[in-house]
Amino acid sequence: MTSDSGDGVLVVGGGVVGLTTAVVLAERGHRVRLWTRDPVERTTSAVAGALWWPYRIEPRARARAWALRSLDVYEELAGRPGVTGVRMVDGVLGETGLDEVAGWATSRLPGLRAATPGEYAGAGLWARLPLIDMPTYLPWLRERLTAAGGTVECRTVASLDEADAPVVVNCTGLGARTLVPDETVRPVRGQLVVVANPGIRTWLVTTDASGALAYFFPQPGGLVLGGTAEDDAWDPEPDPAVAEAIVRRCAALRPEIAGARVLGHRVGLRPARPTVRLERLRLPDGRVLVHHYGHGGAGVTVAWGCAEEAAGLV
């Protein structure tokens, strides 16, 4: 399909995957509209931590390739952190060895090294990775889309049949479960606590002895503490007991967190799928439908690489 003025592409879904895909398409010359159920500031993506690292996403090889392409973009955007919300920040990937990331990560991130005992009391990797402040980044992405001529409309879609364009890109995430329908899309519930930062400048991702997640990310709006990964859990409301456990796990890693003032709670439902669905279909009426969903907990991490591949299918 050519990208002349008569070429209309409708992207359905305003999370980070949908927004990024719309930006790539618009900047390649397509006339792009984006429909989003919620304002971008209230999408699942807005809840994300959001550290660049492939997490809960398959197929692994393709996800790593998408992630590395996205890394190129984030490194460039980190040159304007106040505008884009992207910063390069040091931290530790706990319970991870160099052998586990050999090849794909070590060749691209030459600064990767084993964490010292003073940095982490266990086996871990010290890394400098993109850390994205989503309340800044998502509105910036929306502005980049409109600057490229795209439009954004808040609209709830009950069926993809409502999509009135010759090319439709389905980036509805968890919504694809009913819209496609695709019952292989399942929620993985994540709960976070935001506290006033007691002076922590590095991030940490690890698991405790029971296998529970524990992580903290220093963001401009506070220290983001996590977290959970509950399969097939649909509750969008924060659980006070879960919040207390999150703070307790993080305080075991950095004691100063224990007394930090709580600023807020977040819950997001990650759109998990056995594998990302990135597929071009020709509909009976001749229109093109590109499915682009199922990114699990790695939507931010793979967004640019995956969006470019999706745009190539248009």
Image (tube, rainbow, N blue to C red):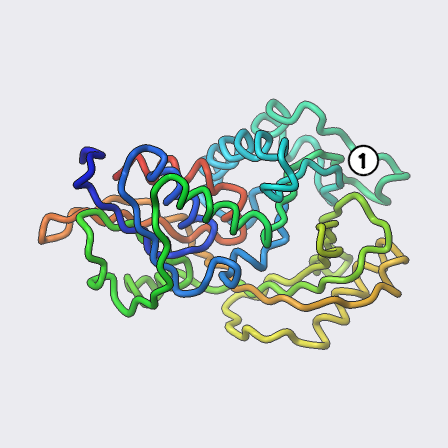
Does residue 220 appear to the left or right of 35 in the view shown? right
* Residue at x 22% of width, y 47% of height: 167
Are there few (<14), some (14-19), or many (20+) residues within 10 Å of tag 1? many
Residue located 20% across and 38% down the image? 5
Dot 1: element: loop
Q: Quadrant of the N terminus?
A: top left
Q: Where residue 63 sits: x, y (%)?
A: 47, 39
Q: Looking at the image, is 269 positioned above or below residue 285?
A: below
Q: Quadrant of residue 225?
A: bottom right
181 relative to 150, above or below: below
* Residue situated furthest left in the rendering: 285
Which residue has dot 1 on it? 115
The x, y position of residue 215, in whole percent, is 72, 53
Residue 280 is drawn in which quadrant? top left
Q: Is residue 248 left or right of residue 139?
A: right
User: Considering depth in this image, is 151 or 241 the residue closer to the camera?
Assistant: 151
Query: What's the residue at 74%, 44% (across, down)?
Result: 94
Q: Tell me if residue 270 comes above or below residue 10 in the rendering.
A: below
- The x, y position of residue 57, in whole percent, is 49, 48
- Specify the quadrant that holds the C terminus: top left
Give the total of numbered labels. 1
